[in-house]
Amino acid sequence: MLQDTPTLSAKLRPGQPAPEFELPDADMNLVKLGGYRNRRNVVLYFYPRDGTPGCTMEAIEFSERDDGFEALKAVVLGVSMDDCLSHGAFRDKHGLSVRLLADTEGEACRCYGVLHDKEMEGRRKTCILRSTFIIDRKGMIRHALYGVSPRGHAQEILELMKGMGGKCK
């Protein structure tokens, strides 16, 4: 289920301006969040890694709802710390329509408070906590959802946006 109460440091909350970023997509074109201001709502989702079962399911579900997001004047951007080549292969293998952005240095991830340390095989590793932000056309965060489950998440986000009605348009 969705949670608006993150448990991480540097957590963002609804009503705050969305941190700006500029990241390359799978085709190595730079995408600037501010480029959508006054034009599109943005669904910004952070995911751990290309090709894993949960991340694949989530990306496919967002892609399958492309028309629904388009009707709400929204663009869907997926961000992970994988590189552009990995994103391109992931997109092409699964026929994804969402735009995948490469945050290889983790700068946007830090700004959005989605990094956390995880112990794996006796070593601590920094990972992305699956999280989604709905950003309106004015660049304000409307929803900040941390620690989400991939199954059914795209539909939950679509319903949240529909529930916002004219506030999102």
Image (tube, helix red, strand yellow):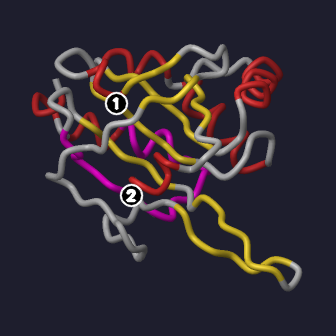
Residue 5 pos. (x, y %): 32, 71
Mark 2 crowd level (few <14, some 14–19, many ≥20, 10 Å Cα): many
- Which of 113/97 is in front? 113
Q: Nearer the viewer, residue 60 or 20?
A: 20
Q: Residue at x 75, y 80 (%)?
A: 119
| Magenta-span inclusion, residue 26 | no
In which image quadrant can residue 135 be found? top left
- Taking the spot 80% from the left edge, 40% from the top edge, the residue there is 51
Circles 2 and 1 in contact, beta carbons < 8 Å: no
Instruction: State the quadrant of the C terminus.
Output: top left
Asked whether 151 falls inside the magenta stretch, the response is yes
Seen at 19% across and 26% down, the residue is 137
User: Marks 2 and 1, Cα distance to the nearest angstrom?
Assistant: 14 Å
Residue 35 visible at all: yes
User: Pointer 1: what residue?
Assistant: 42
> Is residue 107 found left or right of 165 in the rendered image?
right
Q: Could you say which is closer to the camera, residue 43 or residue 70?
A: 43
Outermost left residue:
166
Q: Which residue is mark 2?
A: 145
Which percent across, then down, holds residue 136? 21, 33
Q: Position of residue 24 (x, y in %)?
A: 57, 24
Q: Is residue 118 above or below residue 162?
A: below
Residue type, numbered disc 2:
Leu
Q: Which residues are magenta?
A: 140-158
In terms of secondary structure, where does tag 1 sit?
A: strand
Q: Nearer the viewer, residue 161 or 134?
A: 134
How packed mark 1 is, by other alpha carbons closer than 10 Å (few <14, some 14-19, many 20 or more), is many
Q: Please report whichever mark, 2 or 1, sits nearer to the chain's N-terminal start.
A: 1
Q: Is residue 72 visible?
A: no
The residue positioned farthest toward the right in the image shown: 121
User: What residue is shown at x 31% (from left), y 18% (from top)?
Assistant: 35
Residue 28 rendering spot, x and y as whole percentages = 63, 17
